[in-house]
Image (cartoon, rainbow, N blue to C red):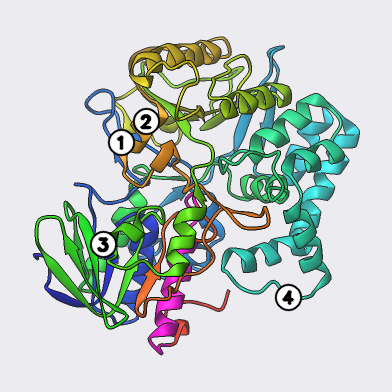
C-alpha cells in the first residue's frame, strides 16, 4: 500500500510514541498514516546490526521498564501482548553493581531479597530502603501515575508528599536516607536511569520510582530486541487499515485559516489530515516546519536544552559477560563521588573516566537469538559532553574514550570483544535526527522562574488540529509510551470522541 493522499489523522514520526498514538487512534476507528523520515521505523526503539553480521544490537533503548506500568501494557489495552506478539522477559537479577573489592551488590525482583542484600552492607540502610519502597507503594506510585498521564494530582496527603519529593534532588534524598557508601552508590546509580543530573531539584522522585520499577519488572527486555515494540504496533496498525511510510521526510506542516490541514514531504508529496495532524517531531525543530510560529511553540523552542548528552559503545562478544560468576542482563559501574566528578567535568566540556556512571547491557543473556550460538551483544552507555573543551573533534577522541571505558569494564569481568562500534554524542545525533545535541532522552525545558521540565506539558497546540507527542512531550524521554497514549487521549477528546473506547481512565 502506498502513501495515501488523505487520511483522518497524519502522524509525523514512527518512534514508539508516534506509533502508540497512531495505534490508539486507529483502534478508535480513525484512518491513520504515519510518516517516518528514516528508512526504518522505531525511532530510538530499534534493533540493528552495528558491529558484525548476525549480531543484533539495541542501538539506543534497551530496557522497557517504564512502559510496563503504562495501562497500554499493564492492562494490555491494545492487545499488544495477547494478540500482536509483543513478549517481555522480566529478569532476576534486575541489575548488579560490581564493587572494587570484588563483591557484588544485587537488585532482585523482590523487596525482601534486595533489602536482605543491602543489609550485608548496612542494616540501617536496609530498613531505610524498605521504607522508601513502601512509601512509594503506599500512595506515591498512584500519584506518579497521574503525573505521568498529565492529570491533576489532586489535594490528598499523598499528592502533597509527592509534590514535595518531586521538588527535591535525588542527590539530597539519597544522602539523607542512606548512610553506607555502597548503598548510596546503588541508589544514585539507579537515579541516573533517565539521564538527568541527580543533583538538580526536580529529580527527587527518581530514587523511589526507578527502584520500584526494577523491583517489580527487573530489566524488562523485549524478545527480538527493542525493535519488537514498534513491530507489534505496526502489525496492529496494518490490521486496522493504517499506513506506516518510511523514507518520508516531512519538511512542512500546512496550516490554513489557523488549522493544520496537511503535511508535505521533502520529495514533494502531500498528505492531508482531515481531522488532525500529530507531530512527534522534536520541539526544537517543529517550529521550522511552520510558515508562522505561534507563541506556545516559539516558547517551547526557546526553552529547550539538550541536558545530558550520551556516549555509547556497542560490541560483539565471543561470550556473555559474567560478574563474580553471575550472568545479568544489566550491570552498573560508578560510585557517588565518581559520578559527581563526571557530571562536573561534563558541564566543563570534559570527560572523567576515573569512576563514571556506566550502564552495561548484556543483551544476549535475555535473548540468545540476537547473536550466533555462544556469542553475545553488549553495550556501554554513559554521559559525555557534546562539545569538548580541549577542542578535539569527537571523530578523533571517540575511540580513545571508548577504550578507557572498556578498560573499566575489563577490570570487573571477562571481555572477549570480536568487534566494536563507538558512538560519541555527535554520532548519536547523526544516528537519529531526534537526538539533538546528542541527547537520546528528549532533553529538557528551562522555564521562567527556574523550573525545569523533562517534557513539554501540552499536547494540543494553539494551532487548531495540531497535536504533540514524542520524547519532548510530557513526561519526557525513555520508553514509557506515555507521550503517545496521552497525545491520543488529547486528540480523541479534541475530536469529540470518547477515549474510553480504547483506553481506561488511568
List the residue tagged with mark 2: 426
Instruction: Quote the CA–CA distance across marks 3 and 2.
Output: 33 Å
Looking at the rendered structure, the secondary structure element under dot 3 is helix
Instruction: Quote the CA–CA distance across marks 4 and 3.
Output: 38 Å
Q: Nearer the viewer, mark 4 or mark 1?
A: 1
Instruction: Quote the CA–CA distance across marks 2 and 1.
Output: 6 Å
Q: In the figure, residue 116 lies in which quadrant?
A: top right
Please tell me how many numbered marks the rendered image carries: 4
Kindly check if marks 2 and 1 are in contact, taking CB atoms under 8 A apart as contact: yes
Q: Nearer the viewer, mark 4 or mark 3?
A: 4
Measured as percent of width and height from the top left, residue 304 is found at 49, 51
Crowding around mark 2 (Cα neighbors within 10 Å: few <14, some 14 to 19, many 20+) is many
For the record, the magenta segment spans 477-497
| Label placed on residue 430 | 1
Dominant SS type (magenta): helix
Which of the image's four quarters has the N terminus? Answer: bottom left
Instruction: Quote the CA–CA distance across marks 2 and 4.
Output: 42 Å
List the residue tagged with mark 4: 154
Amino acid at each position: 500500500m502506498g502513501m495515501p493522499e488523505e487520511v483522518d489523522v497524519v502522524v509525523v514520526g514512527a518512534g514508539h510514541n508516534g506509533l502508540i498514538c497512531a495505534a490508539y487512534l486507529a483502534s478508535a476507528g480513525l484512518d491513520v498514516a504515519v510518516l517516518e523520515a528514516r528508512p526504518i521505523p522505531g525511532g530510538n526503539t530499534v534493533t540493528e546490526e552495528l558491529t558484525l553480521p548476525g549480531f543484533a544490537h539495541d542501538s539506543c533503548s534497551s530496557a522497557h521498564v517504564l512502559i510496563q506500568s503504562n495501562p497500554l501494557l499493564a492492562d494490555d489495552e491494545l492487545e499488544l501482548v495477547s494478540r500482536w506478539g509483543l513478549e517481555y522477559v522480566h529478569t532476576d537479577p534486575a541489575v548488579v553493581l560490581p564493587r572494587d573489592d570484588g563483591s557484588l551488590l544485587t537488585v532482585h525482583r523482590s523487596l525482601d531479597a534486595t533489602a536482605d542484600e543491602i543489609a550485608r552492607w548496612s542494616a540501617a540502610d536496609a530498613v531505610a530502603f524498605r521504607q522508601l519502597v513502601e512509601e512509594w507503594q503506599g500512595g506515591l506510585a498512584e500519584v506518579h501515575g497521574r503525573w505521568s498521564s498529565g492529570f491533576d494530582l489532586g489535594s490528598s496527603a499523598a499528592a502533597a508528599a509527592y509534590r514535595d519529593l518531586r521538588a527535591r534532588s535525588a542527590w539530597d534524598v539519597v544522602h539523607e536516607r542512606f548512610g553506607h557508601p555502597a548503598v548510596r552508590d546503588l541508589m544514585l546509580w539507579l537515579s541516573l536511569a533517565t539521564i538527568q543530573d541527580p543533583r538538580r531539584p526536580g529529580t527527587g522522585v527518581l530514587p523511589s520510582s526507578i527502584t520500584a520499577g526494577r523491583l517489580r519488572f527487573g530489566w524488562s527486555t523485549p524478545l527480538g530486541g527493542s525493535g519488537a515494540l514498534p513491530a507489534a504496533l505496526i502489525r496492529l496498525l496494518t490490521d486496522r487499515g493504517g499506513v506506516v511510510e518510511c523514507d518520508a521526510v516531512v519538511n512542512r506542516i500546512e496550516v490554513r485559516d489557523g488549522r493544520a490541514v496537511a503535511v508535505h514531504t521533502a520529495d514533494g508529496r502531500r498528505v492531508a489530515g482531515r481531522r488532525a495532524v500529530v507531530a512527534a517531531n522534536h520541539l526544537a525543530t517543529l517550529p521550522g516546519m511552520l510558515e508562522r510560529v505561534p507563541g506556545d511553540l516559539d516558547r517551547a523552542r526557546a526553552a529547550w536544552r539538550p541536558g545530558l548528552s550520551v556516549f555509547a559503545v556497542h560490541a560483539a562478544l565471543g561470550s556473555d559477560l559474567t560478574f563474580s560468576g553471575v550472568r545479568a542482563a544489566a550491570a552498573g559501574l560508578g560510585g557517588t563521588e565518581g559520578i559527581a566528578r563526571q557530571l562536573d567535568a561534563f558541564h566543563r566540556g570534559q570527560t572523567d573516566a576515573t569512576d563514571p556512571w556506566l550502564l552495561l547491557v548484556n543483551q544476549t543473556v535475555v535473548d540468545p537469538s540476537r547473536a550466533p550460538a555462544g556469542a553475545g551483544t553488549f553495550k556501554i552507555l554513559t554521559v559525555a559532553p557534546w562539545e569538548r573543551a580541549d577542542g578535539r573533534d569527537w571523530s578523533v577522541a571517540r575511540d580513545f574514550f571508548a577504550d578507557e571505558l572498556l578498560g573499566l569494564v575489563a577490570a570487573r569481568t571477562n571481555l572477549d570483544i570480536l568487534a566494536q562500534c563507538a558512538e560519541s554524542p555527535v554520532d548519536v545525533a547523526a544516528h537519529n535526527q531526534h537526538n539533538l545535541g546528542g541527547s537520546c532522552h528528549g532533553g529538557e525545558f528551562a522555564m521562567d522562574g527556574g523550573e525545569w521540565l523533562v517534557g513539554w506539558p501540552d499536547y494540543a497546540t494553539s494551532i487548531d488540529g495540531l497535536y504533540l507527542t514524542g520524547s519532548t512531550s510530557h513526561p519526557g524521554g525513555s520508553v514509557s509510551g506515555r507521550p503517545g497514549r496521552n497525545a491520543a487521549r488529547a486528540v480523541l477528546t479534541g475530536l469529540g470522541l470518547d477515549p474510553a473506547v480504547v483506553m481506561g481512565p488511568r
